[in-house]
Image: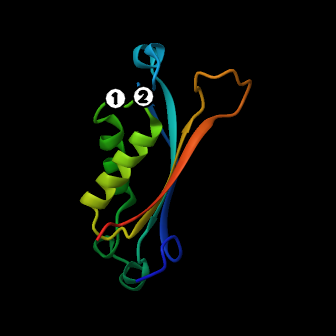
Amino acid sequence: MTTPFTGDRIILNDLGFFGYHGLFEEEAKLGQRFFIDLQCGVDLSPSGETDTITSTVSYASIYDVVKAAFEAKRFNLIEAVAHTITTALFAELPDINWIILRLRKPSAPIAMVSGEAAIEIHRVRPN
């Protein structure tokens, strides 16, 4: 097995979603944009050798799991959103060995002129 967070990976960046996650009433009522950057550790050598989709994890499948987990319920914390997404990815896609997920909230209710609030989690498939 590869050392966590090294080796082959499937990368999806700037996945945009609209959601109602957050601590404040305005966030639950109005909603806002969220963006996800995702790296999934997957051995890509079988698909490189066979050139078949059945030898890899489809990035469309990864997206579908992320979207479903993001929209499953309303969360107070983006940490909980990220945890739910990684748990779902491990449950649905057994070939993923590790995940790095950054969840960005560009309209966080803080007094910033530009920028974004974000969290990043690193997870290894549980045994």
Looking at the rendered image, the quarter that the N terminus falls into is: bottom left
Q: Residue at x 32, y 53 (%)?
A: 87
Q: Is residue 14 left or right of residue 88?
A: right
For badge 2, the amino acid type reads His
- Residue holding disc 1: 74
Residue 35 is marked as none
Q: Could you say whether the residue bearing mark 2 is in a helix, strand or loop?
A: loop
Q: Position of residue 22 (x, y in %)?
A: 45, 26
Q: Position of residue 47 (x, y in %)?
A: 38, 78
Q: Is residue 33 above or below residue 68?
A: above
Closer to the N terminus: mark 1 or mark 2?
2
Which of the pair 118/49 is nearer the observer? 118
- Crowd rating for badge 2 (residues with CA inside 10 Å; few <14, some 14–19, many 20+): many
Looking at the rendered image, the quarter that the C terminus falls into is: bottom left
User: In which image quadrant can residue 110 be found?
Assistant: top right
Q: Residue at x 32, y 48 (%)?
A: 64
Q: Is residue 11 above or below residue 26?
A: below
Q: Residue at x 42, y 66 (%)?
A: 98
The reply to whether dot 1 and dot 2 touch (C-beta < 8 Å) is yes
User: In which image quadrant can residue 119 be found?
Assistant: top right
- Residue holding disc 2: 21
For badge 1, the amino acid type reads Arg
User: How many angstroms separate mark 1 from mark 2 (CA)?
Assistant: 5 Å
Which of the pair 51/18 is nearer the observer? 18
Residue lying furthest bottom? 49
Q: Is residue 35 left or right of residue 46?
A: right
Residue lying furthest right? 113
